[in-house]
Image (tube, rainbow, N blue to C red):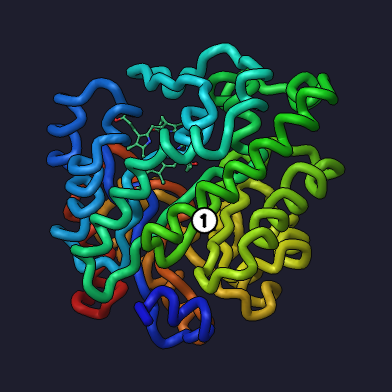
Amino acid sequence: MNRLTDCIINKKSSLLPVWFMRQAGRYLPEFREIRQQNQDFIKLCCDVNLVKEITLQPIKRFDLDAAIIFSDILMVPFGLGQNVKFKKNYGPSLEELDLDKILNCKEETFIKKLKPVYEAISSVKKNLNNKSCIGFVGAPWTILVYMINKKSPKQDFNFENLIKDEYIILKLFEKIKKMISIHIRKQIEAGADIIQIFDSWAGLIPEKNLKTYCYEPNFFIKDSLKKTKVPLIFFPKGIKKNYLNFCDEVKPDCINIDPDIDPEWAKKNFNQIPIQGGLDPKTLLKDEDTVKKEVKNYINIFSDYPYIFNLGHGVLPQTKVETVKLITEIVQGKRK
Ligand code: CP3
């Protein structure tokens, strides 16, 4: 059993595994070089050899406990037939939603389109020895937001407006839930040891709607996979004190906290559910002493609790490679 799984399943507090969200990404010069030569991001995510190479880039530099497959949560809309582009200085841009086409998308068609993801996982696995291979998906709400909003909801987002057409929401949400579950199952079949479920936009859901759009769909995902032994790490980003309700309702194998969550509060209230992450990615842009102090703060708080070291969101592109190395070594006790 690899260290990450051991920490989650056996709730071990002595292991302190470490990996980083977005550990393969733009802060790495070797990633930027490949990206420069591959302007079409989705096409890049479907190139098995390049996905394998990018996934292993951070593993070659740092002694991390896991590789996360290089892919994107928007591969699910792509697999369903809604095309996705990534524009410079804009982010993702999805084409107009064709509801009939999406609802009629067959399981086989979806799986066939996303086959390179599964092949890349199998190929990465062969190069990992005892490290974990992490697969991932976006949670149903976060995928729904992108498919309807067609871009990042960072600006001018209106909840009521997004859910106004009840028929669309009902039908589309069901389809999305089912396909996400299939995408996870296929990643597990391909060899993923752990799956992370990113509900990156859960913070946009009004409190009274959290049950419908966050707790229930995340529970559906968990429940649909109850036969597998693969641990699921949930990340309902931005829901503040409702993290507690999330834990009660979903009973996740492991939960990723964001920088708004007080780690002491989480440890005291999450009832021994293994915790991952928390450190603000912006801390990594500060001086060495501040980085050390903040990293040690999380380590100390969780010294007697099952904890996986990670951040409260992805590594920022401006991050220095040396900082990621420094943190990894501090966590592993190789540096003071
Ligand atoms: O963690 C890893 O190293 C694995 C790779 C990974 C990517 N996306 C690659 C990527 C993972 C786990 C994701 C998840 C993802 N994608 C999320 C959930 C986590 C989060 O950030 O909240 C979301 C919301 C997306 C959607 C997405 N993909 C956006 C909004 C963007 C553009 C802005 C951004 O953050 O970069 C992407 C593009 C993307 N996905 C890039 C990478 C490396 C950048 C592509 C580029 O070079 O332009």
**Image side of residue 178 versus residue 159, left or right:** left
Residue positioned 61% across, 19% down in the render? 101
Q: Is residue 136 above or below residue 293?
A: above
Q: Is residue 328 above or below residue 312?
A: below
For label 1, the residue is 185
Q: Is residue 275 above or below residue 144?
A: below
Front-most of residues 102 and 87? 102
Residue 145, located in which quarter of the rendered image? top right
- The secondary structure type at the circle numbered 1 is helix
Numbered circles on residues, count: 1
**Image side of residue 98 versus residue 185, left or right:** right
Residue 33, located in which quarter of the rendered image? top left
Residue 95 percent coordinates (x, y): 52, 14
Residue positioned 40% across, 19% down in the render? 85
**Image side of residue 147 versus residue 286, left or right:** right
Residue 150 percent coordinates (x, y): 56, 19
Cβ at disc 1 under 8 Å from ligand 1? no
Q: Is residue 269 visible?
A: yes
Q: Amino acid at mark 1?
A: Arg
Quarter that holds the N terminus? bottom left
Residue sitting at the far top = 96
Q: Is residue 254 above or below residue 121?
A: below
Residue positioned 64% across, 26% down in the render? 104
Q: Is residue 27 visible?
A: no
Front-most of residues 148 and 119? 119
Residue 261 percent coordinates (x, y): 60, 58
Residue 128 percent coordinates (x, y): 23, 66
Quarter that holds the C terminus? bottom left
Crowd rating for badge 1 (residues with CA inside 10 Å; few <14, some 14–19, many 20+)? some
Residue positioned 46% across, 51% down in the render? 136
- Splitting the image into four quadrants, where does ligand 1 fall? top left
